[in-house]
Amino acid sequence: MAFQISAQSGPVDEALRATETPDTLRAAFTVTLESPRAMRIYDFDPRRDAGERWQLVDRRGSDEDLDAAAMAWAREAAPDGRLFPDDLRASMGRRVEVSDLGMAWRAGFHHKPSLNDSDLDVWFAERVDAEAWLDPESGRFLRIDYSLPHPVRGPDGGRLTEFQQSYLLETEPHWGLSYIASYTMSLEAKGGFTTIRRNYTATVTSIDFFFASHEAEADFEAERHPATGRNLAGR
């Protein structure tokens, strides 16, 4: 069964709310980055000194592109911010096309660029198909997929022949918030006599969530469970 539904109410709105984490929520995590040629394991903890936050734990093989992706992630002001899909509501828009597949809903939407998107992100958004897989019982997203339906000419020439990007989401058990537990990206581009292929996966193998301060955690709990309203158990 297929139908159109507002993203501002019902299970879709509930799932979006679970992705909207406060800025004061942080995460320490271990992540495995893999490509066909190499593997890297990194450990990140924002509570360490600046030069020690991002640490290489293990490595195998050689892949300059994988290393470059890892170093770009490490140089970000808050690398744990990549685990929180907090701009998904703006990207999804006001309405989505839903197919009820029984165990899950498949919600198709046209990705709308947000303020965080670069010019290249905007270019991709105009050309890819987007789908969100939703568990209507729990009101949580399970997966977000972006795929290129057909080859297109690239913004700087050449042709992008394949593109697939997927996010697997899990639910943090204490606060019930959604986070990205795994990310995969594959693409193929051709220009002149050159073919470029990129294929890698990032998998979070352990994670510890915490707030930047006790006051920030108390503020979040107070906002989530107002004294005059029902608490989670009551609902």
Image (cartoon, grey):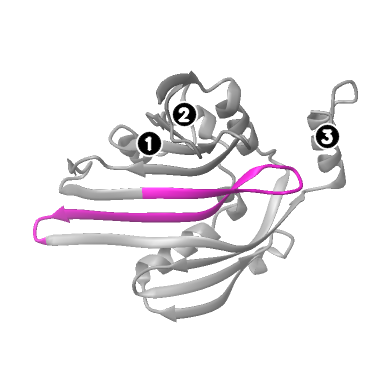
Q: Pinpoint residue 25: horizontal percent, then vertical percent.
A: 71, 45
> In the rendered image, which residue does mark 3 sit on?
233
> In the rendered image, which residue does mark 2 sit on?
92
Quote the CA–CA distance across marks 3 and 1.
35 Å
- Label for residue 130? 1
Q: Is residue 210 left or right of residue 188?
A: right
Q: Amino acid at mark 1?
A: Ala
User: What is the crowding at mark 2: few (fewer than 14 residues within 10 Å), some, or many (at least 20)?
Assistant: many
At horizontal 40% and vertical 43% (from top left) the residue drawn is 145
User: What is the crowding at mark 1: few (fewer than 14 residues within 10 Å), some, or many (at least 20)?
Assistant: many
Quote the CA–CA distance across marks 2 and 3.
30 Å
Query: Mark 3: which secondary structure?
Result: loop
Q: Amino acid at mark 2?
A: Met
Residue ranking furthest to the right: 227
Asked whether the beta carbons under mark 1 and mark 2 sit within 8 Å of each other, the answer is yes
Q: Is residue 74 above or below residue 91?
A: below
Which residue is at the front of the view, 119 or 143?
Answer: 143
The C terminus sits in image quarter: top right
Q: Which residues are magenta?
A: 165-193
Q: Pinpoint residue 36: horizontal percent, then vertical percent.
A: 34, 71
Q: Amino acid at mark 3?
A: Ala
